[in-house]
Amino acid sequence: MAEARLTKGKHTRIIAGHPWIYANEIIEVSGCAEPGDIVDVLDYGGEFVGRGYLNPRSQITIRLLTREEETIDRAFFASKLQRALDYRRRAAPGQNSLRVVHAEADFLPGLVVDKFGDYLVFQTLALGIDLWKETLVSLLQEMLSPRGIYERNDAPVRELEGLEQTMGFASEPFDTLVEIEENGLRILVDIQRGQKTGYFLDQRENRFAIRRHCDGASVLDCFCYSGGFSLNAAAGGAREVLGIDQGEGAIDLARANAMENGFAACSFEQGNVFDVLRQMQKRGRSFDVVVLDPPAFAKSRSALAGAVRGYKEINLRALKILRPGGTLVSCSCSHHLSEDILFEIVREASADAGVILRLVEKRGAAPDHPVLVPAPETGYLKCLILEVS
């Protein structure tokens, strides 16, 4: 097996548990290794650190799979998948739709598996794990006996690994518009055309948490996608809910979901949230609850400054249309934007809006999306629930 030796002084983060090794942290790779092959990682003194897959084409040159000198084979992946399943049974008992594998946080870098009722959707976002795709699909079939499996490898990040974007059935074809149950609601999920794997399971418990703020309220759900927050607001007793999203397909799905649950209080409009918020402020429209759940504005560290301006804009506009005593739900799924930065953005926006906020809750992803402590990148989702005094 080929060996990669770490640069002196560069191994501290890796020894502490981070699974990513960058090119500038490697002195050399000795032995014969093709992209995607398993290599041993040694520290500067030659001591074994771990074992992972190599991809010189990627900025992340090695992704560690194990810190033990064990064979990487079908049995290895079976053990890792079983560990992930056992954790979900403890962390999310009774949930029929959840994240089964959360990549690095489940010690399977680059692998994402979501379960929507009787169906699985997977992504292999790194070359090393992509080479094991057939094995993983076979194991998932054996362990979970799904009615169907769909591949959503149309993520642009694959191109950074030298991989093509692709999608399609990894089982016999099936109707890709599936219905799941979440928080007692019936939700239609389009696993073929929807965003990411079809639905954002990480916000499940945050969607439920807003219910207690919505009884009798007028609610605005910005970047509503297929209506997850809107439906929970209606279930919490909101008298009216308006969802806004730029995607025509998302709005169609949100309307179908509202109809599926008999929520006449929900309505949805297609539009650019930035423009809609400005127009609402000009017209003097106001709400009791505003939910901001935008896509990741900062998809790279270089984009952070622009993202901060974007988050500041939508939070300021939202506060301008919130009634006294109203609730702001402000989310960010950009891992480059920390919770501290989001809190500062909200603080500055409240000062500019001339309102005083108090923080009611700080929330993150549902527990089926665990965070690997040495890898803060895995703790990407932030959700602040705040009240206007």
Image (cartoon, grey):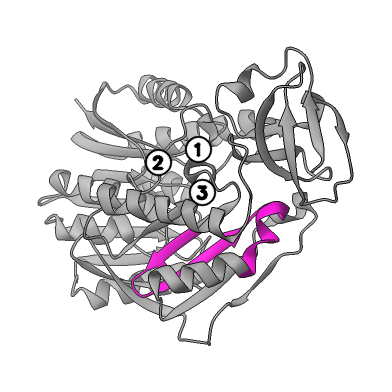
| Quadrant in the picture for the C terminus | top left
Which residue occupies the extreme top position in the image? 9
Q: Earlier in the sequence, mark 1 or mark 3?
A: 3
Q: Nearer the viewer, residue 308 or 151?
A: 151
| Disc 3: CA contacts within 10 A as few (<14), some (14-19) or many (>=20) | few
The residue that appears at 23% across and 37% down in the rendered structure is: 327
- Give the image location of residue 367, x and y in percent: 32, 44
- Give the image location of residue 332, x and y in percent: 45, 39
User: Quick check: can you spot residue 136?
Assistant: yes
What amino acid is labelled 2 in the image?
Answer: Pro
Highlighted range, magenta = 113-134
- The image quarter containing residue 77 is bottom right
Mark 2 lies on residue: 370
Mark 3 lies on residue: 295
Question: Helix, strand or loop at disc 2?
Answer: loop
Mark 1 lies on residue: 378
Q: Nearer the viewer, residue 2 or 62?
A: 2
Q: CA distance from mark 2 to mark 1?
A: 8 Å
The residue that appears at 51% across and 26% down in the rendered structure is: 374
The residue that appears at 38% across and 78% down in the rendered structure is: 178
- Give the image location of residue 106, x and y in percent: 47, 45
Q: CA distance from mark 1 to mark 3?
A: 16 Å
Q: Is residue 333 left or right of residue 220?
A: right
Residue contact between numbered discs 2 and 3, judged by CB atoms under 8 Å? no
